[in-house]
């Protein structure tokens, strides 16, 4: 089984994806037929340039005053707060240092205050001995937030991606706005959506792995916890959820510090010794097509104003034979047999549809297109 699985990882690259770490780069948007034939049907990502340069957002959103004035009459927006920028990620629990799955503190603020919090975090000194701001703010509310919380900005972007809509046969189920800075990082996860990810300002840096690399992600169950934030003290507390809940999540952190590199590489050899992930930087005017069920890790670089802004369109995936193949792959207990570092209990329930999914959990529960797949993500959290 071990050799067969490793052959699968290699053959997928040789037959479909290529052996480099770069994905296809199109100079202009594809036709619907080309997109469907060459990318959607093959579950293959691509980067598309000159895709959104006609959006007014590319000029108007560069000005904070335009954004704040446009949203001044809107209700408060949902700001996700963490101490280090690792929301919906694995962090050590205080006192015992065991890992838990930590969701952010979500607070309602006027957009002006939220944007100030994001850009102020960016401009503070990162030296631990300085008076660094101890909160990282990220506007990442999902649940179709661009068409709800930010509807005043809707005329600045297309309400869907025409060539993708025609190819996929439906309008997007959700359109989301993301505004953050360099301190917000998204850990490896996957989504049950066809994702069209458009950057307006700053840059997004993706690491990508195909669904066939499922076992290289070391998906394990971690106790769910949530941050709470005190405005008075400026301090965070991390508390385990009650009743206890466990979240299957990818264990691998691809960016290692020198002091823990050797230990982490020995804990997760299937990832670090296997095929390299695909890499992609999405710049303003470009769209990344991120196929359903692909694992992705995301970092970001801000613009001169200290923020990274993106819009993504989630189209419902087809629950077809590819989905059946993926579920079969998950059912193979490769790691529990071949990975001596994996606790015997770690594989429990990791064949559920919630494994390492996008944290737009509430949205997926409510808006699943065919109604036949419940709780695709198994909880209520996520960032990107």
Image: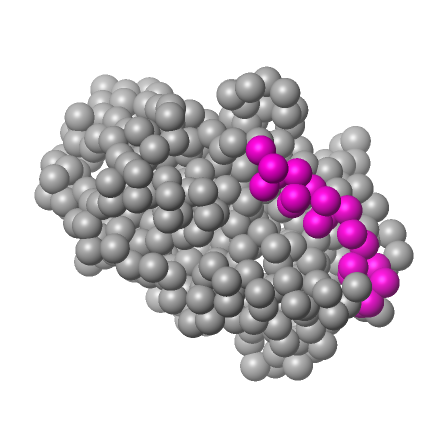
Q: Is residue 225 visible?
A: no
Q: Residue at x 54, y 55 (%)?
A: 210
Residue 169 versus residue 205 in the image, above or below: above
Q: Main secondary structure of the magenta part?
A: helix
Colouring rule applied to residues? one colour
Q: Which is more toward the observer, 79 or 232?
A: 79
Choose top left, top right, bottom left or bottom right for residue 71: top left
* In this rendering, position of residue 243 left or right of residue 138: right
Please indicate whether residue 271 sits to the left or right of residue 2 in the image.
left
Q: Position of residue 341 (x, y in %)?
A: 81, 68
Task: Look at the image and give the residue range highlighted in magenta.
Answer: 320-339
Q: Residue at x 50, y 33 (%)?
A: 317
Taking the spot 47% from the left edge, 29% from the top edge, the residue there is 316
Residue 263 picture quarter: bottom right
Q: Residue furthest right?
A: 344
In the image, what residue occupies the spot 14% across and 45% down? Answer: 53
Residue 207 position in % (x across, y down):
46, 61
Q: Position of residue 298 (x, y in %)?
A: 44, 55
- Residue 304 placement, left or right of 232: left
Residue in the foreground of this view, choosing between 335 and 12:
12
Q: Is residue 87 above or below residue 299?
A: above
Instruction: State which quarter of the image contains the N terminus.
Output: bottom right
């Amino acid at each position: 089984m071990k050799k067969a699985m490793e052959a699968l990882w290699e053959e997928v690259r040789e037959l479909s994806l290529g052996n480099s770490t770069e994905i296809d780069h199109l100079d202009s948007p594809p036709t619907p037929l080309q997109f469907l034939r060459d990318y959607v049907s093959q579950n293959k990502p691509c980067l598309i340039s000159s895709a959104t340069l006609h959006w007014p957002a590319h000029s108007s959103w560069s000005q904070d005053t335009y954004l704040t004035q446009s949203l001044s009459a809107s209700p408060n927006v949902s700001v996700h707060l963490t101490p280090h920028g690792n929301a919906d990620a694995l962090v050590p629990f205080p006192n015992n240092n065991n890992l838990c799955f930590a969701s952010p503190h979500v607070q309602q603020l006027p957009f002006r205050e939220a944007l100030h919090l994001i850009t102020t975090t960016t401009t503070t000194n990162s030296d631990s001995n300085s008076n660094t701001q101890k909160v990282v703010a990220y506007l990442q509310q999902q649940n179709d937030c661009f068409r709800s919380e930010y509807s005043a900005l809707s005329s600045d972007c297309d309400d869907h991606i025409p060539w993708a809509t025609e190819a996929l046969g439906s309008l997007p189920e959700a359109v989301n706005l993301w505004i953050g800075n360099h301190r917000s990082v998204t850990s490896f996860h996957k989504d049950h959506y066809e994702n069209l990810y458009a950057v307006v300002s700053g840059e997004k840096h993706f690491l990508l792995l195909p669904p066939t690399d499922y076992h290289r992600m070391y998906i394990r169950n971690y106790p769910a916890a949530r941050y709470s934030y005190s405005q008075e003290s400026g301090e965070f507390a991390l508390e385990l959820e009650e009743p206890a809940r466990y979240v299957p999540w990818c264990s691998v952190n691809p960016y290692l510090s020198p002091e823990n590199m050797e230990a982490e590489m020995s804990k997760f050899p299937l990832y670090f010794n296997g095929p390299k992930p695909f890499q992609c930087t999405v710049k303003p005017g470009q769209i990344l097509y991120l196929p359903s069920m692909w694992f992705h890790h995301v970092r970001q670089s801000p613009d001169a104003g200290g923020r990274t802004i993106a819009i993504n369109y989630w189209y419902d995936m087809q629950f077809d034979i590819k989905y059946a193949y993926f579920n079969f792959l998950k059912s193979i207990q490769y790691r529990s047999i071949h990975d001596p570092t994996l606790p015997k209990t770690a594989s429990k329930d990791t064949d559920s549809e919630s494994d390492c999914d996008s944290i737009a959990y509430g949205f997926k529960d409510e808006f699943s297109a065919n109604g036949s797949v419940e709780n695709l993500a198994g909880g209520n959290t996520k960032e990107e």
